[in-house]
Amino acid sequence: MNINTIFLFLLVVAAYLNLYLTFKKIRIQRTKTKLPISSKEWKEKLDDENFNAWLSHQESLKRRKKDI
């Protein structure tokens, strides 16, 4: 076996080990992340706020029509 072959083999092993550790780190980070509110709850909250703003806007428009 040539010395270049040994170095090539070690380089390939190091590359695969680096790839494995990187994916393992990403997977651990993904499981640790906890959001204070879920995306579904956030969307419902925004929808409620938008609906309430629309209602108040409609009421103010009705009041303006009555004043005119």
Image: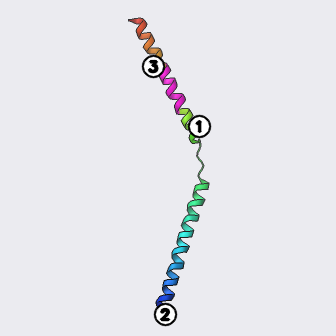
Residue 4: image tag? none
- Determine which residue is flagged by label 1: 41
Query: Is 50 in the magenta?
Result: yes
Secondary structure of the residue carrying numbered label 3: helix
Horizontal arrangement in the rendering, residue 67 relative to residue 47 (left or right) = left
N-terminal of the pair, mark 2 or mark 3, is: 2
Q: Label 2 to label 1, Cα distance in Å?
A: 62 Å
Which numbered mark, 2 or 3, is in the foreground of this view?
Answer: 2
Secondary structure of the residue carrying numbered label 2: loop
- Determine which residue is flagged by label 3: 57
N-terminal of the pair, mark 2 or mark 1, is: 2
- Determine which residue is flagged by label 2: 2
Horizontal arrangement in the rendering, residue 50 relative to residue 36 (left or right) = left
Please name the residue shown 48% across and 24% down the image: 53
Task: Tell me the kind of residue under disc 2.
Answer: Asn
N-terminal of the pair, mark 3 or mark 1, is: 1
The span shown in magenta is 46-55
Percent across and percent down for residue 55 are: 50, 20
Task: Give the class, few, some or many, for how many residues have Cα within 10 Å of label 1's Cα (few <14, many ≥20).
Answer: few
Closer to the camera in the image, 44 or 34:
44
Task: Tell me the kind of residue under disc 1.
Answer: Glu
Q: Main secondary structure of the magenta part?
A: helix
